[in-house]
Amino acid sequence: MQLSSNVVKQKKVMPITKDKKIITVLPPKKISKKSEDIFLNVNLSAEERELMRQSQEGQEKLEKLKNQIINDATLQAEKIKKSAYEQGFKTGKEAGYTAGYEDGLTEGKKIADNLIDQTRTNIKQVNQEINEYVKEKKNDVITYGVKMAEILINKKLEIEPQTILNLIEPVLFNLEKPDQVIIIRAHNRYHMVLTERLEKMKKNSNIRFAVLDDNSMGNAQIKIESEDAVVTANLTEELKKFLNETVGDVK
C-alpha cells in the first residue's frame, strides 16, 4: 500500500493550457480482400500486381458509375412524377373556376400523363446510355482479361515448361504417322520437353523430327511444320477470340 502511494506522489500532473491541441489519428485505410490477395501473391511481379490492381479498379469504377446513373435516374423520375401530379391538381383546380372543376381535372390529368410518359422516355434513354458506356468499355474488359490470362499462363509455363505439351498434343496426335517429318519451332525453354516427346513418337511411329530454338517467340507461341500442314499456335490470339465470344454484345 505504501509503495502505491509513493508512485502516485512521484507523478507530476501537467497543467491543462488553453493552447493544447487534440490530435485525432485516423485508422489506416482498409484494403479490400481482393487487393490484399494481389499484394500477398509473391508469385507476381510489381508490374503484374499493378496491372491486376488497375483491372479490379476499372471494374469497380464501372459498377459504381452504373449504379450512380440508375440512382440518379430513379430520383429524377420521382421528382418528375411528383411535379406532374402537383401541376395536374393545380391546373385542374384553376380550370375549374372557369370551365368547371371536372374539365379542369381532366386537363390536369393529361398534363400529368404527358409528364409521366416523358419520365419513362428519360429512364429508357438513361438505360441506353448505360449500355453504350458498357459497350465502350468492352474492349478494355477484353484487354484486361487477356493480360490477366497471359500473366497466369506465362507463370505456369515458366514453372512447368511441360505444360506446353497440353497445347500441341492434339496436333502431334494427328501427325503421328510412319516416316513423318516434323519440325517444331519454339522458345529454347521448351527444347528438352519437346525433344523428349518427339523421341517417344519416333519409337512408336519411326518419325523424323527437329526442334529449332527461336527465342523471338513468346512463352505461349509454338509453330509445327510437317509434310501435310503448318500449324501456328498462339495462346494470346486464342484468348482474345475466346473473350470476344464470351463477352459478346452487351444488351
Image (cartoon, rainbow, N blue to C red):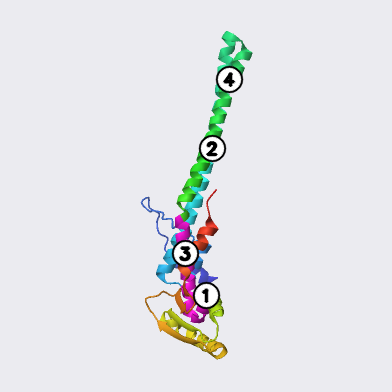
Give the number of the mark in front: 4 or 1: 1
Closer to the eye: label 2 or 1: 1
First reached walking from the N terminus: tag 3 or tag 1: 3
State if disc 1 and disc 4 touch (CB < 8 Å). Answer: no
Decide if residue 115 is on the left or right side of residue 191: right
Q: Which residue is mark 4?
A: 108
Q: Does 241 sit above or below residue 96?
A: below
The prevailing secondary structure element of the residues shown in magenta is: helix
Is tag 4's residue or tag 1's residue first in the polypeptide sequence? 4
Which numbered disc, 3 or 2, marks the residue closer to the eye?
A: 3
Q: Which residue is mark 2?
A: 123
How many numbered marks does the figure carry?
A: 4
> Does the magenta segment cover residue 145?
yes
Q: Residue at label 3?
A: 146
The structure residue drawn at horizontal position 55% and vertical position 70%, both measured from the top left corner, is 1
Q: Nearer the viewer, residue 23 or 18?
A: 23
Magenta residues (range):
139-167
- Please determine whether, in this image, residue 220 is positioned above or below residue 183: above
